[in-house]
Image (cartoon, grey):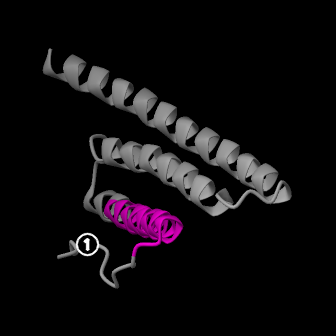
Amino acid sequence: MEELLHSALVHLADWAILFFEWMGVLIILISGFRGIYDFIRRDPKTRLTLAKGMAMGLEFKLGSEILRTVVVRDFSEILTVGGIILLRAALTFLIHWEIRTEEQHDTGESVPFFPWKKKD
């Protein structure tokens, strides 16, 4: 019974990983094409729109990597998945910082050097 439950969990996780990976790729592709379209139209919010789309796509990809930790079998796989998670989390953090910077630039607010510190 335990083996059956484990097998069902692995299959469910594999399908969910595949779904989230495809959603992330699809969102990034759509955002890229939208960014090209906005760039050609000379939309001033092109960078902000593109960054938001990329961040959303990376969130789905990060979710798939977190799910991948369910099905890892040995320590080298854990290290690989952990490294990928750290890289994608860093990219997501940088993109969110870029979004915040662009939004503050649009409103005329000052941009803090350390984005995780709140303004006084």
Residue at 33% x, 81% y is: 112
Q: Quadrant of residue 13?
A: top left
User: Which sits in the foreground, 50 or 84?
Assistant: 50
- The residue singled out by tag 1 in the image is 116
Q: Residue furthest front?
A: 108
> Which segment is the magenta one?
82-109
Q: Residue furthest bottom?
A: 113
Can you say whether 95 is above or below 15 in the image?
Answer: below
Residue depicted at 26% across the width and 61% down the height: 75
At horizontal 80% and vertical 50% (from top left) the residue drawn is 37
> 31 left or right of 100?
right
Query: Is 100 contained in the magenta span?
Result: yes
- Three-letter code, disc 1: Trp
Outermost residue to the left: 2
Where residue 56 appears, x then y in whole percent?
48, 47
Residue located 52% across and 47% down the image: 57
Asked if 84 appears above or below 8 in the picture, the reply is below
Give above or below for 8 relative to 60.
Answer: above
Give residue 2's position: percent from left, percent from top: 14, 21
Q: Quadrant of residue 40?
A: bottom right
Q: From the image, which quarter does the N terminus lie in?
A: top left
Please name whichever residue, 99 or 75, is drawn nearer the observer in this view of the structure: 99
Magenta residues, dominant SS class: helix
The residue lying furthest to the right in this view is: 40
